[in-house]
Amino acid sequence: MEEFKTVEVTTDLLIIGPGMAGSGACVEGAHWAKENGVKITVVDKAAMERSGAVGMGLSAINQYQGENSPVDYLSYVRQDLMGLCRDDLVMDISRHVNGSVHMFEGYGLPIWTDPDGNYVHEGRWQLMINGESYKAIVAEAGKNAVGMDNIIERVFVVRLLLDKNDKNKVAGAIGFSVRDPEIYVFKFKACIVSAGGAVHVFRPRSTGEGLGRAWYPPWNAGSSSYLTTTAGAEMTSQEVVFIPGRFKDGYGPVGAWFLLFKAAATSATGYNYMAEGLAEGGELHNWPPYGEVKPIPTCLRNHLMMIEMYHKGDGPIFIHTDKAIAKLAEQAPDEKAYKKELKKLEAEAWEDFLDMTISQAVLWAAKDVFPEEGPSEIMPSEPYFIGSHSGASGAWTSGPEDIQTGESKSDYFWGYNRMTTVKGLFAAGDGVGVSSHKFSSGSFTEGRIAAKAAVKYCVDNPELPEVDSAEVDKLKERIVLPLKHYEDHKNYTTLGSTDKKYDLPVEEVNPNYITPKMAIFRLNKIMDEYVAGWGSQYNCSAITLNIALDLIKLLKEDLNKLAARNLHELMRCWENVHRVQIAEAHTRHKLFREETRWPGYYYRSDFRKMDEEKWGKVFVNSVYDAEKDEFTMLTRPLHHLVEIKEVVGM
């Protein structure tokens, strides 16, 4: 501890995690902060230019309203989530998102346009972009708004601190630099948690050299959920994971292929399972009303794929890129134009990957894949926690006051938009539950919404809360404990880096500690085998979930013996602590909801069907008591603020 310097930062509003939501919070927050004399500070585990889910880039903006109404978008979201979403949160983003997209274009983001100057749509809500530098462009706007002197990079926030005099009010945060031996203690009036969802809670399909490969960015370790949960905030829908269907091994996106190129997917023998599922008497009619209208919910599209792969054994699943490209090119008037159009479409196919999933393009090149000549395999991935996409997990937050009805206002509004049940603690992006399908532009918009409300909270509550110094001292020791474990026990090992003869790189096996790599393997195995990962074909039951809870309890005990050789591994240790917290919450939520509402995301083998009467009008929520290490499970009512007469498609 003598080697670690303590850096104290006092501010009014702290933004934790400037991904897309955090960048939106920077842009909007800075405007209102300057008008009201509020100081904003930003902290990022990585570098803001490339942090967050959009760090590698994107090939499309997936939420743009255009001339559609918020109710139109709500119809699509509600259908895709099998009926369960917060109408007020979804429509709040929807009514502001066009402005965010126009801001992106003003920042310099290239959006595709046709010869008439109109945006090129991938689908009803999606715009095609040249988005390799999407995050860098948006981050620059956020940096300029807040000012570089107020941005702290390469600092991992470990935990939030509560007010010494009010345990339901946030007062600060503590973390450490991943580059220098420094502990950071932040003191503030309010904070916005926008630190992403979680990947690598479940065992990934990729192994060996591809171990870190996932669809959702591997650096997202559940920090949003951990920070809000351990602060005592009420959480919602932690049972809802997202499992995207993606190109095999490289996890490349399929959206452009289905929506823009109009490609079809079939089983190995050519069975068009999507069309058959919709036909009279098809599988989708077993999931009314959501399986009986278009667009088909994401989970049900997965469900049809899984039937072919796991139940019928007619896998793998192929997406016919070659037929899609040929069909589009056939519209050309002559052979010369046909060849030119074919080359153009081929280039667009490769660009789709190079804009956002470069590893897929590399894999195609390595395997001599030519998308215009033959089909490619697609598959369901491992589960992810991502409240901004087709999942729903996150914090239970207050919504906008003006959208509420009399009944919803008492349940969905408590003073400040996007504030959690802990005073001064706001969330945005993947940090907010049941405001799904906001994607990148909607997350940026939600960051703007949260920041405006958080600045107002700071103005309304001008006194700085009191941080408990004794708690800070305990956490300082706890944070660096893995480094001490390693130093104390590194020589008592089976394999060591001191063995020059064999040049063995790490001390993997030691009776006194557990390495972060071994810890994540252990978590992955528990979740995959007992909590409905791909290895169990996405099945679980009360029996397997209770086994998982027993194993997670043992793992949590062993996390006290994590060891780190350096600051990078110290970060890995604490990422695992964050992952285990969301893993336990997910398992408890899954056990509590006794139905299969999202087939294709997971199956309760002991409750195979939806139970609309018991579960169709409630959200599953939880509150965690950090001192007792206990969860309290509860439900909150679903209020539909508008009646949906027609489901609006993709």
Image (cartoon, rainbow, N blue to C red):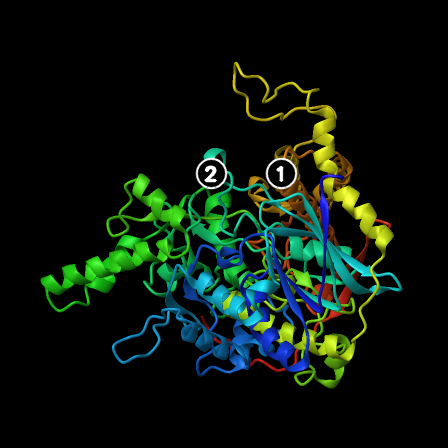
Q: Residues within 10 Å of mark 2 (few under 14, many from 20)?
A: few
| Mark positioned earlier in the residue sequence (1 or 2) | 2
The x, y position of residue 283, in whole percent, is 51, 58
Left or right for 201, reference 405? left
Closer to viewer: mark 1 or mark 2? 1
Q: Quadrant of residue 482?
A: top right
Label ID, residue 569 = 1
Does 320 appear above or below 390?
A: above
Q: Which residue is mark 2?
A: 210
The x, y position of residue 344, in whole percent, is 22, 61
Cα separation, mark 1 vs mark 2, equals: 19 Å
The x, y position of residue 637, in whole percent, is 74, 71
Does 130 appear above or below 305?
A: below
Does 195 appear above or below 441?
A: above
Left or right for 351, reference 564? left
The x, y position of residue 287, in whole percent, is 57, 63
Q: Nearer the viewer, residue 68 or 111?
A: 111
The residue at 79%/47% (across/down) is: 475
> Circle 2 — which element?
helix
The quarter in which the N terminus is drawn is: top right
Residue 41 visible in the current orientation: yes
Amino acid at the residue labelled 2: Gly
The residue at 56%/49% (across/down) is: 219
Q: Nearer the viewer, residue 318 or 136?
A: 136
> Circle 1 — which element?
helix
Left or right for 116, reference 305? left
Amino acid at the residue labelled 1: Glu
What is the count of numbered marks? 2
